[in-house]
């Protein structure tokens, strides 16, 4: 572990074993690597402690992080039942550290761990650097009502890079507008109607079933693979 910042290190909040709690791979065992720092500020963020780089007290080199991941894997090996272990890079926004992750994968984890990249979908130039190593890209579409930015142009570029490995999640709150949801489904359908879309009702919000089902019906006009899924780890009371 290294406690000073230089270009060969990245700020890490935590590394731990758990089960994926969101999206179409919910329930699979994973090692989670949570990076500190994010370029967005969503009003529903459930990892506020990871938003600032300097919130992390631990800066790792790629080699030190690999050794840590390996330790966590060895402590939880039995939970993978002989399957290739999956590492979820999450945050914060992990693609702020794409060069670091590229070094980690190229020098250390390639062939040993599969790569599940959880991202806010706003850094298309960064995903290009590591896309070939990703097994799954779990991308959010962020609405202006949530993050005060219109990211649709950037989301389009991002989806064009990773359309073959991506599924998309949209968090729906009481503030989500129908017009922006329609825009998201139109964007996805132009890239590919087969991209899976997960409609995730925000866990803290008293969002009505009526609104969620309306959004389902809107997207089903354009897309072929849609699910409504809450955050399962919160129901399960695991992290
Ligand atoms: S992109 Fe993710 S980590 Fe960043 S503010 Fe939004 S919800 Fe939080």
Image (spheres, helix red, strand yellow):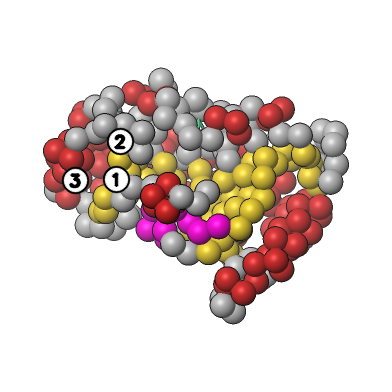
**Residue 207 position in % (x across, y down):** 24, 33
Q: Give the residue number, with chain letter if any, for mark 2.
A: 172
State the extent of the magenta-drawn residues as a range. Answer: 18-26
Cβ–Cβ under 8 Å for marks 1 and 2:
yes
Q: Is residue 132 above or below residue 56?
A: below
Q: Is residue 70 visible?
A: yes
Identify the residue at the far top of this view: 148
Q: Give the residue number, with chain letter if any, for mark 1.
A: 199
**Residue 155 position in % (x across, y down):** 41, 38
Residue at 53 percent of width and 64 percent of height = 29
Helix, strand or loop for disc 3: helix
Judge from the rendering whether residue 51 lies leftward or rightward of residue 1; answer left or right. Answer: left
- Residue 24 falls inside the magenta stretch: yes
The front one of 50 and 182 is 50
Q: Is mark 2 within 8 Å of ligand 1?
A: no
Residue at 60 percent of width and 53 percent of height = 32
Q: Give the residue number, with chain letter if any, for mark 3.
A: 216
Judge from the rendering whether residue 235 lies leftward or rightward of residue 53; answer left or right. Answer: left
**Residue 238 position in % (x across, y down):** 50, 51
Cβ–Cβ under 8 Å for marks 1 and 3:
yes
- Specify which label sits upstream in the sequence, 2 or 3: 2
Helix, strand or loop for disc 2: strand
Q: Is residue 10 above or below residue 21?
A: above
**Residue 40 position in % (x across, y down):** 51, 27
Q: Is residue 72 above or below residue 186?
A: below
């Amino acid at each position: 572990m290294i406690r000073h910042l230089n270009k060969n290190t990245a700020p890490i909040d935590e590394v731990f074993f758990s089960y994926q709690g969101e999206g179409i791979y919910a329930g699979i065992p994973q090692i989670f690597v949570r990076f500190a720092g994010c370029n967005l500020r969503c009003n529903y963020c459930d990892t506020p402690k990871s938003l600032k780089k300097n919130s992390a007290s631990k800066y790792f080199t790629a080699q030190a992080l690999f050794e840590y991941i390996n330790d966590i894997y060895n402590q939880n090996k039995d939970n993978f039942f002989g399957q290739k272990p999956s590492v979820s890079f999450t945050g914060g926004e992990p693609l702020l550290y794409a060069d670091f992750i590229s070094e980690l994968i190229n020098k250390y984890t390639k062939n040993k761990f599969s790569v599940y990249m959880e991202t806010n979908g706003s850094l298309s130039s960064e995903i290009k650097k590591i896309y070939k190593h990703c097994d799954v890209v779990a991308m959010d579409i962020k609405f202006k009502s949530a993050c005060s930015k219109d990211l649709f142009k950037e989301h389009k570029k991002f989806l064009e890079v990773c359309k073959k490995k991506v599924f998309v999640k949209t968090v729906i709150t009481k503030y989500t507008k129908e017009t922006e949801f329609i825009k998201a489904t139109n964007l996805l359908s132009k890239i590919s109607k087969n991209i899976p879309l997960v409609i995730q009702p925000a866990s803290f919000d008293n969002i009505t079933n009526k609104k969620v089902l309306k959004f389902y019906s809107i997207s089903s006009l354009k897309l072929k693979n849609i699910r409504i899924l809450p955050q399962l780890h919160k129901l399960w009371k695991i992290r």
